[in-house]
Image (cartoon, rainbow, N blue to C red):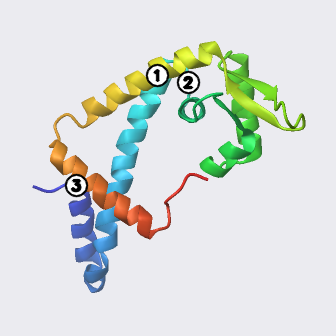
Amino acid sequence: MSDIVDKIVEQWSEERPEVVDDLWSVQFVGRVQRLALATERSIKATAAQHGLDIGEFDILTTLKRSGPPYALTAGTFLKASMVSSGTITNRVDKMEAKGLVERVRDGEDRRTVKIRLTDHGHEVTRAAFDDHLASHARLLADVDRELIEKASDSLRKVLEALGDTDIK
């Protein structure tokens, strides 16, 4: 059996036979990219069912998994997301207008503003995350669980080798 990446590699092998030995990276990265596209479509669809875009879903789930008091600074999101501060500000503005988050001053340092989940934000996050898990389960339903676990372990090792070992 073969996939679209095999076809791409085959085409490059015919077009540029001198690079055949270098196509191993295309096989790996191409498949990771295609998997990322499939999962991103799934995440976007799930987020949209809850009136969210993928960035809002990311902020909500980041706040929720951070634990009590479910509040983080915008700087924390900047470090984790690789988007500009203006993007974070605009995203939080939209989410605040929807009643999902609120800006609160830190009790210890009044200059620091944190973004905190509201009660409504907690409810939306719970429902959206439950649907997110179900969507992933549907997406991978026809794939052997042991294969998924082995692939996950292998990808972890690749990410570790690339230095992607911590959320900062």
Determine the image quadrant of residue 92.
top right
Q: How many marks?
A: 3
Name the residue beneath numbered marker 1.
128
Q: Tell me which numbered mark, 1 or 2, is placed earlier along the sequence.
A: 2
Q: Amino acid at mark 3?
A: Lys
> From this viewpoint, is residue 147 visible?
yes
- Image location of residue 77, percent across then percent down: 66, 43
Please say if the residues under marks 3 and 2 sit with CB atoms less than 8 Å apart: no
For image coordinates 68% across by 15% down, the residue present is 99
Q: CA distance from mark 3 to mark 1?
A: 28 Å
- Disc 1 to disc 2, C-alpha distance: 9 Å
Which quadrant of the figure has residue 41? top left
Is 157 situated above or below 115?
A: below
**Label 2: element kind:** loop
Q: Nearer the viewer, mark 3 or mark 1?
A: 3
**Nearest the eye: 142 or 79:** 79
Mark 3 lies on a secondary structure that is helix
Seen at 77% across and 42% down, the residue is 86
- Identify whether 33 is placed above or below 111: below
Specify the farthest residue to the bottom: 18
Query: Circle 2: is it few (<14), some (14-19), or many (20+) Cα within 10 Å?
Result: many
Q: Residues within 10 Å of mark 1 (few under 14, many from 20)?
A: many
Residue at 43 percent across and 33 percent down: it is 43
Of the image marks 3 and 1, the number of the one nearer the N terminus: 1
Local SS, label 1: helix
**Residue appearing at x 26%, y 29% in the figure:** 138
Q: Which mark is residue 52?
A: 2
What residue would you read off at disc 3?
150
Q: Is residue 76 or residue 68 the one in the foreground?
A: 68
